[in-house]
């Protein structure tokens, strides 16, 4: 099994324990999804940068919670994942209030959501959206069981 995972924090709204987030996502990929091969970069961004990405690449106005870019070679015969996920921390803060959850839980949900998109899940049609949401909820329950999500909001003493 080979895997590369980078987390890049390009926002200032919240202090994020990127070391814990990386461990969480790596566990998601290797243990929960049993991926054989992955190369993933997750960017944590603010609403302004996300709105720019959303307009430039998707032709949508305003910010959004998650945008993914899939770089998987369609000829690949193994279960693998190659891409980038952009996660908007400002949207996590806003939506956590709307859904009465923590912003850390929303952050984990967005990472999971992005990974599912890279694995071929889609949320355009209602039936596909329900299927994706069920899997997203299942995986979020698993990572919540394994990791203290509240600690995503605290800086690791070992973090650079």
Image (cartoon, rainbow, N blue to C red):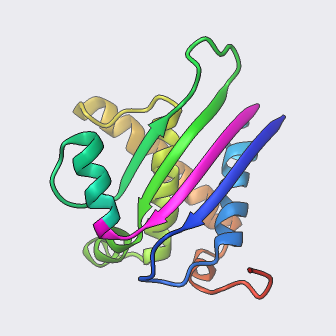
Q: Is residue 17 visible?
A: yes
**What's the magenta bit mostly, secondary-structure-wise?**
strand
How many numbered tags mark residues here?
A: 0
Q: Quadrant of the rendered structure where residue 81 is?
A: top right
Seen in the picture, residue 25 relative to 10 is either above or below; the reply is above
Seen in the picture, residue 61 relative to 33 is either above or below; the reply is below
Residue 37 colored magenta?
Answer: yes
Question: Quadrant where the N terminus lies?
Answer: top right
Which residue is found at the position 74% from the left and 80% from the top? 160
Say whether residue 12 is left or right of residue 79.
Answer: left
| Residue 74 rendering spot, x and y as whole percentages | 55, 15
Say whether residue 123 is left or right of residue 147.
Answer: left
Which residue is found at the position 38% from the left and 53% from the top? 66
| Residue 145 rendering spot, x and y as whole percentages | 65, 65
Say whether residue 79 is left or right of residue 59.
Answer: right
| Residue 21 rendering spot, x and y as whole percentages | 64, 66
- The residue furthest right is 1
Pick the residue in front: 148 or 12: 12
Which residue is found at the position 57% from the left and 26% from the top? 72
Pick the residue in front: 137 or 27: 27
Residue 159 colored magenta?
Answer: no
- The residue furthest left is 61
Say whether residue 95 is left or right of residue 76.
Answer: left
| Magenta highlight range | 35-48
Q: Is residue 35 visible?
A: no
| Residue 104 rendering spot, x and y as whole percentages | 50, 74
Seen in the picture, residue 25 relative to 49 is either above or below; the reply is above
Q: Quadrant of the rendered structure where residue 127 is?
A: top left
């Amino acid at each position: 099994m080979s895997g590369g995972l980078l987390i890049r924090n390009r926002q200032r709204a919240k202090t994020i324990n990127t070391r814990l987030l990386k461990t969480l996502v790596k566990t998601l990929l290797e243990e929960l999804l049993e991926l054989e091969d992955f190369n993933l970069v997750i960017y944590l961004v603010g609403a302004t940068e996300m709105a720019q990405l959303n307009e430039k690449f998707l032709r949508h106005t305003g910010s959004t919670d998650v945008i993914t870019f899939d770089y998987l070679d369609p000829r690949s015969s193994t279960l693998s994942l190659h891409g980038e996920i952009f996660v908007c921390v400002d949207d996590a803060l806003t939506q956590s209030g709307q859904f009465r959850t923590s912003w850390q839980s929303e952050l984990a949900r967005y990472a999971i959501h992005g990974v599912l998109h890279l694995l071929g899940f889609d949320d355009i049609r209602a039936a596909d959206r329900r299927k994706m949401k069920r899997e997203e909820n299942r995986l979020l329950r698993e990572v919540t069981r394994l990791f203290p999500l509240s600690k995503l909001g605290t800086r690791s003493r070992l973090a650079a």
